Image: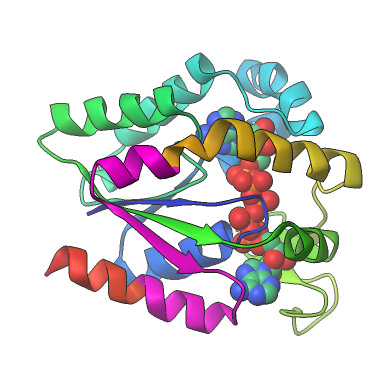
């Protein structure tokens, strides 16, 4: 089962992908997390990606697709993947289709998590992310039990460098221009599902689980 989760920044892709991957025992592949890991480790890829991440621009397709293809070759991706934040452009979606097709597989469903801009701004201003396991919290709507500490792994929580007002505004603009065309792409493929992301995380999760069950039936 290969599931694409997409939507604007702050839609809840990461929040939902962690839960779905756990529930459905699928690998969770988040290109944003992979870039941030490379950045922290000061790899050559991290250094090339840094300025794009900080400004809220997309990392060029060539780098992103290469990163994703290497990840698809890992053993845990063979049984299925929740893609979180990939693809984000038409060339990325086409590359994913080709790669899965070559493995005798395909994207089962592309779930668009819909959230309005005002809600994105409210969410990203209060987001805290675990520096180790990537679990996501919000200081008002989903606070950790202990301030600043991840309740799953006990490591420190941090705020992301691209959650500044200027970078958020740019990420929203980039989303509308470069990622929104995927709605028509997946609609034409007959695999688009829209999920209202402006509800409690549990309600969004329940909808997504129903979608996964329908795909795997
Ligand atoms: P990435 O890390 O993918 O960032 P993003 O798409 O901007 O999305 P976010 O991670 O900000 O939000 P999310 O939808 O995961 O929401 P979350 O669950 O955290 O990418 C970062 C950068 O990497 C890009 O800008 C680009 O530079 C690069 N990059 C990554 N992939 C790339 C690609 N494919 N191509 C090129 N470049 C790429 O939730 C947000 C907050 O809301 C949290 O605090 C959470 O607790 C809260 N929340 C979640 N759900 C709910 C709910 N239902 N109700 C209330 N609050 C909620």
Find residue 51 and report its image quarter: top right
- At x 73% / y 57%, what residue is drawn? 117
Residue at (67%, 24%) from the top-left corner?
Answer: 46
Quadrant for the C terminus in the image: bottom left
Q: Is residue 37 visible?
A: no
Q: Residue 16, position in %: x, y?
A: 50, 66
Residue under the image location 39 percent in, 40 percent down = 184
Q: Residue at image x 81%, y 81%?
A: 146
Lateral position of residue 120 relative to residue 66, left or right: right
Q: Is residue 203 left or right of residue 49?
A: left
Residue 99 falls inside the magenta stretch: no
Name the spot of residue 181 as percent of width and height, x first.
48, 35
Magenta stretch: residue 201 in it? yes
Colour scheme of the picture = rainbow
**Relative to 123, 33 lies left or right:** left
Q: Quadrant of residue 151?
A: bottom right
Residue 142 x %, y %: 71, 79
Q: State whether residue 207 appears in this view.
A: yes
Instruction: Work out whether residue 62 or residue 130 is closer to the camera in this orientation and state it.
Output: 62
Q: Give, as a single range, the part of the protein colored magenta.
A: 183-208
Q: How many marks can you see? A: 0
Give the answer, above or below, for where 8 lies relative to 173.
below
Outermost residue toward the right in this view = 165
Which of the two residues, 110 or 28, is positioned nearer the viewer here?
Answer: 110
Quarter of the picture holding the N terminus: bottom left
Nearest the camera: 192 or 206? 192
């Amino acid at each position: 089962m290969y599931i694409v989760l997409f939507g604007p920044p702050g839609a809840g892709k990461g929040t939902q992908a962690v839960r779905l991957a756990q529930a459905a025992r699928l690998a969770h592949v988040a290109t944003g997390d992979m870039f941030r890991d490379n950045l922290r480790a000061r790899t050559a890829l991290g250094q090339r990606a840094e300025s794009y991440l900080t400004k809220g621009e997309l990392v060029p397709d060539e780098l992103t697709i290469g990163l994703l293809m290497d990840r698809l070759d890992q053993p845990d991706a063979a049984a299925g993947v929740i893609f979180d934040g990939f693809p984000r452009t038409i060339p990325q979606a086409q590359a994913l289709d080709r790669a899965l097709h070559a493995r005798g597989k395909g994207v089962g469903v592309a779930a668009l998590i819909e959230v309005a801009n005002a809600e994105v701004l409210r969410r990203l201003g209060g987001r805290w992310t675990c520096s180790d396991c990537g679990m996501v919290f919000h200081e008002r709507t989903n606070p950790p039990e202990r301030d600043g500490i991840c309740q799953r792994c006990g490591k420190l929580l941090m705020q992301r460098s691209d959650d500044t007002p200027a970078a958020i505004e740019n990420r929203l603009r980039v989303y509308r221009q470069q990622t929104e065309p995927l709605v028509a792409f997946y609609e034409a493929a007959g695999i688009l599902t829209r999920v209202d992301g402006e509800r409690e995380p549990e309600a969004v999760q329940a909808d997504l689980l129903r979608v996964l069950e329908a795909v795997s039936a």
